[in-house]
Amino acid sequence: MNQGTGQNKLTVTARRLRGRWNLVVGVVILLALVATAVASYFYVPHDPNRISVMNRFQPPGGEFRLGTDQFGRDLLSRIMVGSRVTILVGVVAVGIGLTAGLLLGGLAAQYGRWIDETLMRLMDAVAAYPPLLLAILFGSIMGPGVVSGMLAIGIATVPLFARLVRANFLTLREAEFVQAARAAGASNARILWRHLLPNTAAILLVQATIAFANAILAEAALSYLGLGTQPPHPSWGRMLREAQDFLVFSPYPALMPGMAIAVTVLGLNLLGDGLRDLLDPKTR
Amino acid sequence: MQVYLIRRAITFAVTVWLAASLAFVTLLIIPGNPAQIILGIDASPSAVAAVERALGLDEPPMVRYLRWLGDLARLDLGTSLVYGVPVGSLIAERLRVTLPLTIMALVLATVLGVPLGLFAARRRGSWADLAATAFAQIGIATPSFWLGIFLILVFAVNLRWLPAGGFTPWSQNPGKAFLSLVLPAFALGLARAASLTRIVRSAALEVLSADYIRTARAKGVPEGVVIRRHVLRNALIAVATVISLETAQLLAGAIIVENVFTLPGLGTLVLNAVSNRDFPLVQGIVVCIACVILVLSLVTDILYAYLDPRIRYS
């Protein structure tokens, strides 16, 4: 009986996913990224920082699946370990953006008037700073590193979430079901928890996925510029920078980390699109 | 419309003030004494105190802020600690590279993105649409610096068609100056072209399903006219709105791409300033770019009102 229900659920899920190839591809890529990062704590084919002059510029295949760089370090191991930073920066930056955005957007929608006006102008001001610019500003004082990068990318994402939350809350507040709840004597906290938040979650999830992708691109750019992860810790952007000068000897040390960035960002963007299609009733 | 313009001008002024203040406040609240950072941890206290005096750090923050704001209002961005010249003139000099690069990338993005988006929308569901959508997705996901590296490898190192990096000043040889910006503009503009393709495609799809398009077709209006007069015009409204966003991305992207191609623009200037701990220079460039982005968003808003007759702000 249980097995039957399980199978039914599987069929229903499969039917829902049919035609949503972007969602499927996105989920697969995201899972692969997480699995890679987790696996890197237990197993890497080679020590990612071990220098071996004998094995410089090995092409992919054989002992080194993705080849080696200018110091003979294994590219696969370095990409695996580098994925940790990628996930960390994405999660922390989106976490900062989402938390602060919910708080500020919620406050603006709830209290309106001058609080709303002040907060939204502040958001406009922050939005004038692209993440990279903010990271450069922070990096110049705090010194380059992952922390200043994460903080800057996170803060740069706040306006996006704050505006989204404010607009959604304002629309929902006028909706009949919220008016009905209010008439029935529901408190502000209950309305927020039971109606406003659940009805904003879907759109926030979509936005968070896309913000995650942008955070990864921004972190890679920062590391490429030398403002993110510091050596010898491998990060995808930094690997690219180091490989650039040796391009004529072998393209693989630059090709592989670049592919890792592009595929991850592509996967997250596809996931975002897929989730939007799935969750937005207008496109159903 | 006039009331709208006045209101928009006031909000613009407030936002610019806030954005500029943010750069100042950031330097205040982030831990670390700039004078100590400039001199290094081994510096003697007297040397640190001297630099603090030179930078005006010995004064209360409010006094510093008001003086800084007053200077900013007179477009005085301060003096670079390393170069010893006004930050404004350094920025103006470097803009000779960054501005043409950004414009070339923007033109490339528009010339590639708009037709491709329209083309994909007209052939919705076809292989051509799929190819355009795939280009858009892959283009957005490709880091500009990665693309730049491989453009150098193929077009500069292997084919030797274009320079691998560096810049010949416009005054020396305008042709060479232009050529040295071609590959960087491609590296910078391709992701924006991809993003525009997506936006134009979805805007055009929305217009194509509108009643007035069906009416125009039913009247026997030739397809070319329908596309030019109705679809393109309405899609352009979407383009105008995203152009400010895209330009912001391009300016930020220029910082990286200039680095890949070793172009002497704003991007390399700001990075050198970071590694030299030249705070006035970093602050000046950052405030400048933020203001350009705000001006662009103002222009876009006004342009939006002109392009779309349905929008009349009051």
Image (cartoon, coloured by chain):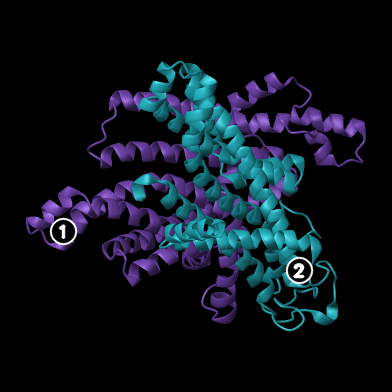
Chain colours: A cyan, B purple
In the depicted view, which residue is nearer to us: B99 or A243?
A243
Asked which quadrant contains residue B65, the reply is top right
Chain on which label 2 sits: A
Q: Where is residue A46 in the image (x, y as percent from the top left)?
A: 81, 72
Q: Position of residue A243 (x, y in %)?
A: 70, 69
- The answer, for residue B145, to whether it is visible in the render is no
Q: Residue A221 carries which label?
A: none
Mark 1 residue element:
helix
Q: Residue furthest left?
A: B219
Chain on which label 1 sits: B
Residue B247 placement, left or right of B228: right
What residue appears at the point 74 percent right and 19 percent down from the top-left corner?
Answer: B60
- The correct choice, above or below, for A10 with respect to B155 in the image is above
Pointer 2 residue: A77
Q: How crowded is mark 1: few (under 14 residues within 10 Å), some or many (20 or more)?
A: few
Q: Position of residue B190 (x, y in %)?
A: 47, 62
Mark 1: which amino acid?
A: Val
In the depicted view, which residue is nearer to us: B154 or A91?
A91
Pointer 1 residue: B225
Same subunit, tags 1 and 2: no
In the depicted view, which residue is nearer to us: A178 or B130?
A178
